[in-house]
Image (cartoon, rainbow, N blue to C red):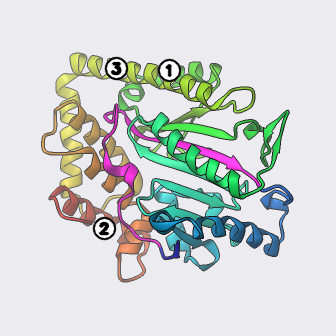
Amino acid sequence: MSTVGVNANASKWMQGDGKESDIVISSRIRLARNLAGYSFPHLLNHEQAMQVVEKVASVFANLPGEEGKEYDMLYMQYLPSLDRQVLVEKHLISPQLAEKEEGALLLSKGEDVAIMLNEEDHLRMQCLLPGLQLEVAWQKLNKIDDMLEEKLDIAFDNQFGYLTACPTNLGTGLRASVMLHLPALVFTKQADQLFSVVNKVGMTVRGLYGEGTKAGGNMFQLSNQVTLGLTEEEILSRLNKVVMQVIEQEKQARIWLQKENDKALADRIWRAYGILTNARSISSDEMMEKCSLIRLGMDLGILPNLNSAMLNRIMVGTQPAFVQKKSVKELDPQERDWQRAEMIRKQLRGEEL
């Protein structure tokens, strides 16, 4: 294990492949765990919080062979705020961890496993993969969880399961989620009704960066609400069934859009492509809106010679912190919009950001 800075390369979940990748952008499994004998993070002083970080870090530092070289340690207190925001934009840490000086991140080389330390819980472990791969992500993270339980004293109660700072995470401590691209359900005004039904079966819908955030680019996170009283397998099975139903609804809405509004839809998509390939200034919000239309056009076969990986790189790689990190000077908001437009034009020409 090594201590490094933050890079602006694409994470594994941005590859654009995996099952149902035309609608499911990524799958995430997250486990909340705490060390016995320590208060929850919000009650720890600086010294105690760093003890938690070092206990977990020592486990990974002593992994054998190549496995021990798989993870890098990033300490929030030593990271510039810009680098922290890049990690947020890549969905590797939460905005809450980015603000915590006592926080840290254990990050795998492929950035598919990210372990936040001293966020809301001592450990917030996640595995993030492209497409619909909930079971694969769970199996990978479960092995890491088992390894940690052999080395550390994890807070557990026979009645309530894993003890967590927030009661809603008691039990398995597992949150499973998928990021969905649902433009057709939004355009046909079916999304709100569908989300209401989803909430009634124990699931919740959030925005692009989780709780309290908006659904930029028609992207939504669908996850389980209940963690207590169910096994991990039951949680994953229930979520998978709901996800498949949402996917089917989106596919039917896309078929209807093409049938009823074929020329108007094609014109809207090509206009979005024209803006991204020619604009000299563009905001993050407009970029997300146009990328959503272009992704829809690609999935429907309206736009040729594009792929999901490229769009994911644009969607993440032209967010504000990324744009600033790529620049050699400090940018004001207007300059960022100009820089973003140039980066998008280059990417659509096949050049690297």
Q: Residues within 10 Å of mark 3 (few under 14, many from 20)?
A: many
Residue positioned 18% across, 40% down in the render: 270
Residue positioned 36% across, 52% down in the render: 315
Do the CB atoms of the residues marked 2 and 3 lie less than 8 Å apart? Answer: no
Whole-angstrom CA distance, mark 1 to mark 2, is 43 Å
Determine whether, in the image, residue 289 is placed left or right of residue 298: right
The picture quadrant where one finds residue 327 is: bottom left
Whole-angstrom CA distance, mark 3 to mark 1, is 19 Å
| Mark 3 residue type | Ala
| Mark 2 residue type | Trp
| Mark 1 residue type | Lys
Residue that numbered label 1 is attached to: 241
Helix or strand or loop: what does disc 2 sit on?
helix
Residue 75 spot, x, y in % from top left: 61, 73
Residue that numbered label 3 is attached to: 253
In this view of the protein, which residue sits in the foreground, 191 or 48? Answer: 48
From the image, state whether disc 2 or disc 3 is nearer to you. 3
Helix or strand or loop: what does disc 1 sit on?
helix
Residue 286 appearing in the image = no
Residue that numbered label 2 is attached to: 338
